[in-house]
Image: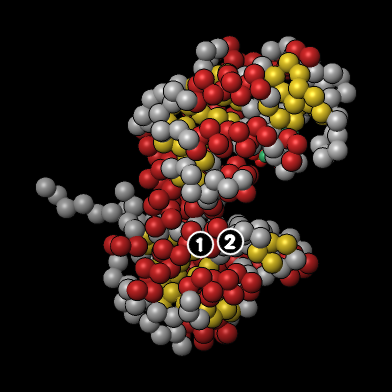
Amino acid sequence: MKKTIRDYDLKGKKVIIRVDFNVPMKNGVITDDNRIVESLPTIRYAIDKGAKVILMSHLGRIKSQEDLEKNDLKPVAVRLQELLGQNVVFVEETRGKNLEEAISSMQEKDVLLMQNTRYEDLEGKKESGNDAELGAYWASLGDIFINDAFGTAHRSHASNVGIASHLPSGIGFLIEKELTHLEPLLTNPERPFTVILGGAKVSDKIGVIENLVKIADYILIGGGMMFTFLKAQGYEIGKSLLDEESLDFCKKILEEYPNKILLPVDCVCGKEVSEDSPIRAALISDIHSDEMGLDLSMRTFDLFKSYVERSKTVFWNGPIGAFEVDQFATGTKVLCKELSELDATVVIGGGDTASAAIQFGYKDKFSHISTGGGASLELLEGKDLPGISAICDKEYEEI
Ligand code: AMP
């Protein structure tokens, strides 16, 4: 068990909280502030306990000078200030005199947000490469380190693993909530336990399929990745997505688990991924050579429903159609609706699936929507997440 923010006396301490403010932005405007909202319980707790709260987060990827402006964290500081209802000091730099002076003048309950940690990637990938000097420097700015950025917990970066190796550390309420919902899927799921996987590429999901096929009762496959499975079974898939390199894996896993892995029986086909492409429903044995399968159709809805409605636990990762285009969003919407009506534990993986569920109005309709796509998948692959492993363990008194 890892220490949590509750295990420390925060009063008067400089508490560095690594949050996940990696929010979607368009022209400097935040289009979805869910990740900021999810960070509030930990930040508010630290304020209430009288900490000096130093926030660090990444935003996007920084490879060139132009990326700096696109991924400036300033708009996040403004939104955070509105949500918290108190002043948030924003420091434009990730190191140096300004940052150090701003921190040394902080009072109890003050909140400061440092510029995007990945600004340090511009020269030498210092943040993403977990540069030892950078981790030690950031740690020198605080007394206690709290990691609450689940979305990057599967990465070993200076702002999580680097800082944690120099300071007393704990996890925040968001990471605690993620673990509370995700870990029982591996250890103690109420059965039947059904996993639904969609999304574009099989190769991204091989690890999770290999681990969950041993634990789950059923794995239902949809999305672009279903076509590699269908091809492996000998179907003609037209111009649908194909992940050639994963064909052998699909053949092998279908042979090993013929009754656990369930594939669609029909789909919605179009000639292109656009709103005005003519579409038709087709059996999977009848996809034309110039067509792409872009969503699931009625017979598959019925088939999937028959498994889903008797499940007591469901984990879903990956949209089951090209949901960004309205006419291919039906399957993902139908699935959201069915899952939201179940008397079962329903956990939604992060990334695109979370965005789709929230966009279609199902934000509070499931047991849990993860804030970390890659991190939740790696956890369910059975891997240790470095950002969590690096946090101090709880000490137990001998009985
Ligand atoms: P992933 O990041 O692997 O979860 O993939 C998400 C993406 O898969 C989304 O952008 C969807 O539009 C896309 N997707 C889902 N189903 C299909 C499909 N049948 N054909 C093409 N793309 C799809």
Classed neighbour count for the residue bearing mark 2: other residues with Cα under 10 Å, few (<14), some (14–19), many (≥20): some
Q: Is residue 80 above or below residue 313?
A: below
Residue at 38% over, 31% down: 189
Q: Is residue 9 above or below residue 257?
A: below
Q: Amino acid at mark 2?
A: Asp
Circle 2 is placed at which residue position?
A: 33
Given contact means CB atoms under 8 Å apart, are the residues at marks 1 and 2 in contact?
yes
- Decide if ligand 1 comes within 8 Å of the CB at mark 2: no
Residue 170 x/y as whole percent: 37, 59
Residue lying at the far right in this picture: please name it: 290
Q: Amino acid at mark 1?
A: Val
Residue at 73% over, 16% down: 284
Quarter, ligand 1: top right
Residue 105 x/y as whole percent: 46, 88
Tell whether 360 sits left or right of 27.
left
Q: Out of 77 and 321, give the one closest to the viewer.
A: 321
